[in-house]
Amino acid sequence: MAIPIGTTARQISRIARWTLTGVVTIGMLSWWWPSFEAWGSLVGGLLAVFTLWVLWRVVAGDRAVPGHALHLAMAAPAVILVVHLVRGIVHRQESPPVLSSAMDASMIFQFAVLALGVMLSQSLLPKATEHASVLSVCGGAMILGSLAAIFLADPGPVRSALALLGFAGIAVWLSPLWTRGGVGQIALSPALRARLRRFCVALAILAAGALGTLSPEAALVTGAVVGGILLVAGGVFRGSRRPLLACGAILLAGVAAVIVLWRPEMPFARAYSAGVWGRGEAAFAQIGAAEAGLVVLGAVCGWGGLLWLVGGMLVTTVWLLGHAHRSARGDLGRALTWTSASVLAACAMLAPGGLFLPAVTLSVAFTWGLLPTMLAGPQTRRPGAILLVICVGIMLLLAVARNDGLIVWAAGTFGFQERMLHAGVGFFLGLLLALLMGVRKVWLGLAGIALAAAAGGLVEWAQKLAGTRAAEWKDWGSHALGSAAVLVPYLLAMGARGCESRDVRPKEAMTRYDVGV
């Protein structure tokens, strides 16, 4: 029996959406320590969601990907790291390797994971802005995870990053109070709704007090961030200009007074000069992973890459706040809470040790991915070929780097050997080529899968040419097997779409970007 057009895509998107919600919740609760197991779990979860996302797009016949300004902000540091990696390969005999490309490759991979998380959140979770339960669960997980990490273990240098993650969770927890669907989706009486609001605010105050007691420095950073956002919002939301400017000025003055009188050691106090473009992984001879993310990025990417990243984040925030004011869907309370959550998550990443915490990376992807939707910003679309370029880049990275770093270390904790990594790369390359070439014609998708299998031989040849490692044609075989494995989900997806008929009217419309929950 025929089914309405879009039914299969709708079901796959639902599975992907709830899988991503589960990854976010579990990650916030448990991946708060920089272990290879945590990184491997994060990457595995995101790749599982990415596979569902690609199949959704195949069935929907849509090759475009959502665009986000944060991707442009991350581009400069990533390019600088790639240049350092290539220079290390070219001049490997003139200057002996410090860490054999491990840290350069690891940080490039981290940027790729963050970019993937932002893209998935932006594409799959826009409907979460109307569902208080999803936002409450994610915000509660951020709060509980950070508090549990500080209480149950000695987080040492990452205490400030975890506390900032908890403060970001408080902002996420409060954001459902201003969702378009109200507090939850169940019809509530005004009195019960008011009591529920007071209960949410009371829990937020208790959590903020606990986090402030455990990490006063993080509380000061939070106060400064919220104060700055209130000042910016005062210049944007004209109807509430005076109270916003007054509250922002008072909050910043209070933070400044506490810093002058108490003189605490702030998380971002240490500086390290490494020039405009940084030193790549060679900078780790003077710094360590426990340093502030601000220091690490400044050392490996230079102040040029750091300014591009931080400046891009700030410009994106102000730009989206402007859209929240101009759009009829914009809401002051939701704009302030979610902007605070996004900026605090970024501060957690830039705090000591925060750059290497999987939970922090996931929080940045979650909050920044939903920032355009929560602030009623424009939803841009980019060619799907961008994903193919990134996938090919990672494949070449695995081939020419002397030490693949985090990619191999995280996979090794689950018993995955190097050839299984080759198979994984072949699988995702085949999946992307099937999407880009075969959304209309099945034979073109099969040709794309065959092209992906053949690409493994070119990579082995590039590896031999670079001279970093010997080419092993068994790796090509593993790559080809991974590409061949795409045949099953791709043909099932195309077959499911073939069972849909235009003669059967759908009960709900499917949009180009997001479909019903």
Image: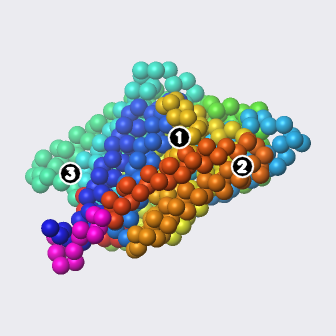
Query: Range of the magenta residues?
Result: 495-508
Instruction: Give the mark, 3 or 1, whose residue is nearer the N terminus.
Output: 3
Q: Disc 3 vs disc 1: which is toward the camera?
A: 1
The answer to whether residue 155 is left or right of residue 491 is right
Three-letter amino acid code at disc 2?
A: Gln
Along the viewing direction, whichever of 133 and 245 lies nearer the viewer: 133
Q: Are marks 2 and 1 in contact (CB under 8 Å)?
A: no
Residue 299 as seen in the image, left or right of residue 328: right
- Numbered marks: total: 3
- N-terminal-most mark, 3 or 2: 3
Give the alpha-carbon distance from disc 2 to disc 1, as whole Å. Answer: 17 Å
| Label 3 Cα neighbours within 10 Å, binned few <14 / some 14-19 / many ≥20 | many
SS for tag 1?
helix
Q: Which residue is mark 1?
A: 420
- Residue 268 image-quadrant placement: top right
Residue at the extreme left = 189
Of the 4 image quadrants, the one containing the N terminus is bottom left
Look at mark 3 in the image and give the residue it sits on. Answer: 184
Mark 3 or mark 2: which is in front?
A: 2
Q: Is residue 446 left or right of residue 268?
A: left
Q: Residue sitting at 14 percent across and 52 percent down?
A: 186
Identify the residue shown where x is 55% and y is 45%.
Answer: 478
In which quadrant of the rendered image does the C terminus lie?
bottom left
Q: Position of residue 57 (x, y in %)?
A: 38, 64
Nearest to N terminus: mark 2 or mark 1: 1
Q: Residue at x 22, y 74 (%)?
A: 501
- Mark 2, residue position: 463
353 over 131 or under it: above or below: above
